[in-house]
Image (cartoon, coloured by chain):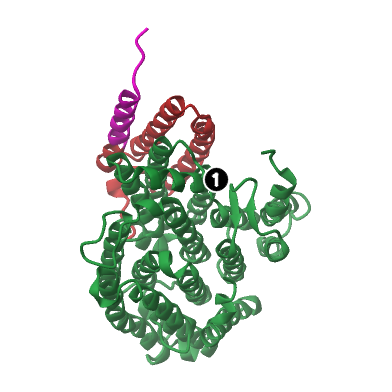
Amino acid sequence: MSPDYTGLFQALRPETSLLFGALVALGLDLSLFRRHTSGERLNLALWIGALAVLAAGAHVWFGPHGPIFGGVLILDPLAVATRLGVLALTLLTLGVATAARTPRNPAEYVAIILFATTGFMLMAAAQQLLLAFLALELASLSLYVLAGFDKTRPESAEAALKYFLFGGMAAAFLLFGFSLIYGLTGSIELLEIARQLTLQGLSPLLVVALVMVLVAFGFKAAAAPFHLWAPDVYEGAPTPSAAFIASASKLAGFTLFARLLWPGLRAAAGNVSTLHGAPGWLPAVAVISAVSLLLGNFAALAQTNVRRLLAYSAIAHAGALLLGVIAAGRSGPAPFFFYAATYGLATVGAFGVLAVVERTGSCQKITDLAGLHRRSPLLAGCLAIFMLSLAGIPPLAGFFGKFTVFAAALQLGGLAGPAGWLAFLAIALSALALYYYLIVLKQALVAPPTANASRIVVPTLARFTLMAAAGLIVLFGVAPSLLLDLF
Amino acid sequence: MITASLNEYLVISGVLFALGFFGVLLRRNTLVVFMCLELMLVASTLALVAFSRFNGTMDGNVFVFFILTVAAAEVAVGLAIIVALFRLRQTIQLDELNSLKN
């Protein structure tokens, strides 16, 4: 097989345009725009970033499909959909960044967002352990920097350190798992690994490898019991960074996870449709999913800080997404992709609202949102859409996401097996989740504003971003086939 | 000449990994924790090279080159975060980093 470099180059044009955009943003900022105010420099960098993201989107849409470079990359419907989703979420994050406090090095901030996006794009398409690891590390290292970007606040640095230590440990676990898988199968190509594992069956070394990989992804996806970093990072990181960490990285991470587990390690999957099914990674994922659902929802009830509340709700959503990954073996990746993409939209939007409110003062406690309907009806309305979508109220996209995932899980064996019970648990806990989302909305929509609260002026680009996110949530809720037709 | 078998390499790499893991869990100085993280990466590297040798394929060796690069990048980012934190808090002890409520 002779390597097909032309095909590789064409498949990687989206990544190339992202990197090119990042370098142009850095270069212009260092040369021509050095003496301008930081606001102008941020605007320039954001526009360049947005153009690069749009160019990448066009390349993904019109680019090649199928296996690339002998199967190192696979551009199947899941990869294309995830790439488009990640790019859309990046664009919204850039929009959120226009409203947030201007960072000290605006061009670097945008460039690092683009580097992280490059990592996500490769994660979406990687079909080989080395590329998967490199893409994950490119994304993670960029995200650590983004979390610690506000060098004036100790909370930001502390969030970055915690994220870094947990993430670094996850990377080491993942790598050890990968090295064992390589040792067992003699290959780092997912398809070849799958072929070898069908012949071998479940050996003790493979069990160790599976545990390592699951622990690593538990950390990355902020699933309980590996979630400890998430509340601190969401609280301490600058708002656009938190939005990015909560949305795009989730989507790309779950795509990579599903691809690694289902085509790659399918032979060791086991069975969760009956109680006494075969052992494998499915039962382990089911346990992580159940623990995440329980811990995320119950801990979110006790929160007074709106960002920590979003973090615990993210843990609960990670549990539901893992249920979608379990069901992906039978129903395909569409349900969990839809869930992850619409969850990302709602989360970016919610953090976007927080970023705008933050312009007039701190916005950490839930009570800081008091009287938002008077201070800015637009923000309050958008926040209501995002929160209700996260809670899964029809006709918003979050409802349909929950519906497809739970329906797919129930198809695995009805209420007779753990998968069905898990879906039932998730449905019951959704009702609980509505309570804490409504606590936030009560402050924003019902409570009177505090005495010294002023009206909030929403900058034009931020207004456009929030309305785009809210509009997409309504659109995908009313017409989910727009997203599902990508598969 | 006595050559080590694959299992011996794996045991060493497992021990190194466990040392690193417990170091991360138990040590309280951020720099030492950081070194333990690197130890975990090196343990995986050793396993990869051993597997590469005994599988007779080059994939593991190539993987190691990339891991070394990633580890270097991780050191750069990690140390930068630690320096930024030290400038703001004048401490790198994990116990004293509790401004975010737990």
Please state the chain letter of the residue tagged with numbered disc 1 in the rendered image. A
> Tag 1: residue type?
Leu
Q: Is residue B51 above or below residue A135?
A: above
In the rendered structure, the answer to whether residue A58 lies left or right of residue A117 reads: right
Q: Quadrant of the N terminus of chain B?
A: top left
Q: Which residue is mark 1?
A: A131
Q: Name the quadrant containing residue A113.
A: bottom right
Instruction: Report x, y in % for residue A411.
Output: 36, 75
Chain B in the picture: what colour? red
In the rendered structure, the answer to whether residue A421 lies left or right of residue A472 reads: left
* Residue range highlighted in magenta: B1-20
Asked whether B5 or A366 is in front, the reply is B5
Instruction: Report x, y in % for residue A255.
Output: 49, 60
Chain A in the picture: what colour? green
Say few, some or many: other residues with alpha carbon within 10 Å of mark 1 (under 14 / 14 to 19 / 20 or more).
many
Q: Residue visible at 25% across and 67% down?
A: A274
Residue A255 visible? The answer is yes
Name, please, the residue furthest toward the top.
B1
